[in-house]
Amino acid sequence: MRILIDVDGVLGDWQRSYLTLYRELGGRKPRSWAWKRFRSHEDLPDFKQLDPHIWRSRSLFEDLEVYPGVRPALYRLNQKHSVYFATALPPEHHKVRDKWFEENFPFIYRQRQVIYSNAKWILKADVHIEDQPQRLAPWLAKNPEGRGYLVNHLWNRSKHYEDMLNSAGEGRWERVNSFTEAAEAL
């Protein structure tokens, strides 16, 4: 079985990296919800001023913390299936991300199982594990035999996203709490 796995928000905690940089650059704490988790970085008080600096920073991707349990689950999955990282990271960060892959998942990276693309819907696979409904829905539509797993986060919980995914692949996707939960289902 061929499996595509998104990276940021699925394997690693990009929110933590984003918020660390936001605070280091002097970003003010939001009032309306928990500081540790946010629905959208666009809701942060200093988003417009700081966001361009954060996305240009190497450390946003260099210091990405791998979620607990991901390494052993991914290792087991890779023993049984063809696993590919599919990430939409911009080209200026590919070298940093390659280093991160080598350090955290050498058993996949050394086999060159990394795909950089915003057009994930063109990638053929049996399974796609993703945290962005707007990326999973087109993939489901173009891969009618495929199965999708949406990793649950505050930013992807809405009726709009549920409807989008159902219209693209009703009965062929499910919401999971973590990558490890999706890996156990496979």
Image (spheres, rainbow, N blue to C red):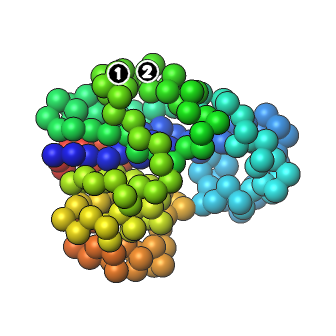
Q: Amino acid at mark 2?
A: Glu
Q: Residue 21 vs residue 6: left or right?
A: right
Separation (CA) of disc 1 from disc 2 = 7 Å
Q: Can residue 151 be seen in this snapshot?
A: no
Quadrant in the picture for residue 94? top right
Report the residue at 53% width, 30% height from top: 97
| Vertical relation: 157 (above or below) 104 | below
Q: Amino acid at mark 1?
A: Arg
Q: Secondary structure at mark 1?
A: loop
Across and down, in percent, residue 157 comes to 47, 67
Which is closer to the viewer, label 1 or label 2?
1
Across and down, in percent, residue 82 comes to 21, 38
| Vertical relation: 129 (above or below) 84 | below
* First along the sequence among labels 1 and 2: 2
Across and down, in percent, residue 123 comes to 34, 53
Report the residue at 50% width, 53% height from top: 118
Q: Are marks 1 and 2 in contact (CB under 8 Å)?
A: yes
Report the residue at 45% width, 19% height from top: 103
Q: Residues within 10 Å of mark 2 (few under 14, many from 20)?
A: some
Q: Nearer the viewer, residue 50 or 85?
A: 85
Question: What residue would you read off at disc 1?
Answer: 110
Question: What residue would you read off at disc 2?
Answer: 102
Q: Secondary structure at mark 2?
A: helix
Q: Residues within 10 Å of mark 1 (few under 14, many from 20)?
A: few
Q: Nearer the viewer, residue 79 or 182?
A: 79
